[in-house]
Amino acid sequence: MMKIKYFRDKVIIVTGASSGIGLATANLFATLEAKVVMAARSIDKLEEIRAKMPDPTKVLCVKTDVSKEADCENLIKQTVEKFGRIDILINNAGISMRAMFLDLDLDVIRRLMDTNFWGTIYCTKFALPYLLESKGSVVGVISTAGYLGLPGRTGYSASKFAVRGFLDTLRVEHRYDGLHVMVFAPGFTASNIRNMALTADGSPQGTTPRNESKMMTAERVAQRMAYGLRVRKNEILLTPVGKITKFFTFALPRFVEWVEYQMMAKEPESPIKKK
């Protein structure tokens, strides 16, 4: 059972809050009586979600494109003006891709880095003084792709590696300041991120190549994130496959490369050719 008292009245910012893990996380914290700030590009969708929450007066919606520095600064400014503090920042907003680097328009990688990496940098930079004051938490939602390079996902893996490197360093810089930094890697989760994944020319993929019904739900992921925040974990890597992959990446790197190549090549209409 989740302990409601821990999150009650904590001010929690969630980026990418209009769908998937972000939406499930915002909903969970709202039920745990936190003050939730929902950030996403679609303000209309956020307001629809807000109206259905247990106490809409404790929810703030801010139109935010995290790839824009000014939007991230405004997100933090509005949060502090509304609630007076920040206790938790969850950098969840992100986009994916699926294409061979050989065929990839370089603008696709720029878009992924702007959203996944720079979005985390911008929001964390502006929120950090308030998080240090509250001895709060900053979370970066990455992926197993932040631990090993996934073929057909060069830009995605690069951005997630970068987020992990940034947050691991931030943790060391502030190890005596009471700041909690958590790298959170959920693995394959049932969400719309694969539907919106960019193809070689930057257009959305439109459909998922995987069976979403067999994946961990976004709601379960949100519960695990809340647990990690409550006990102030440095890192959470969900799913047995993810944990095993991380271990064998260091122990048997060539074997892991072979396995991941074969696995990604089996996806429907995969850009990777099966060998």
Image: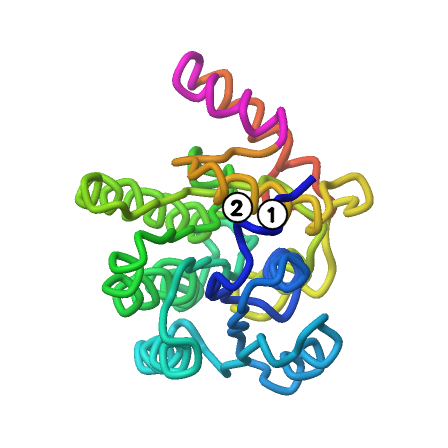
Please indicate whether residue 1 sits to the left or right of residue 26 in the image: right
Residue at 40% in and 68% down? 107
Confirm whether the magenta stretch covers residue 112: no
The quadrant holding residue 192 is bottom right
Figure quadrant of residue 21: bottom right
The secondary structure type at the circle numbered 1 is: loop
Q: Main secondary structure of the magenta part?
A: helix
Q: Residue furthest right?
A: 213
Mark with earlier residue (2, 1): 2
Mark 1 Cα-neighbour bin, 10 Å: few <14, some 14–19, many ≥20? some
Q: Nearer the viewer, mark 2 or mark 1?
A: 2
| Amino acid type, callout 2 | Gly
Does 219 appear above or below 231? below
Q: Secondary structure at mark 2?
A: loop
Could you say which disc has been placed on residue 271 in the image? 1
State the residue lying farthest toward the front: 5
Q: Where's residue 56, x and y in %?
A: 65, 79
Question: Percent x, y for residue 75?
Answer: 40, 78
Q: Quadrant of residue 117?
A: bottom left
How far apart, in angstroms, are the residues tagged by discs 2 and 1?
7 Å
Side of 205 relative to 163 (left or right): right
Q: Nearer the viewer, residue 130 or 148?
A: 130
The residue singled out by tag 2 in the image is 152
Rendered image: mark on residue 37 = none
At x 42%, y 58%, the residue is 88
Q: Is residue 81 left or right of residue 50?
A: left
Comparing 65 with 49, the one in front is 49
Between 129 and 121, the residue placed more toward the observer is: 129
Q: Which residues are magenta?
A: 239-253
**Quadrant of the snapshot with the N terminus:** top right
Side of 24 relative to 167 (left or right): right
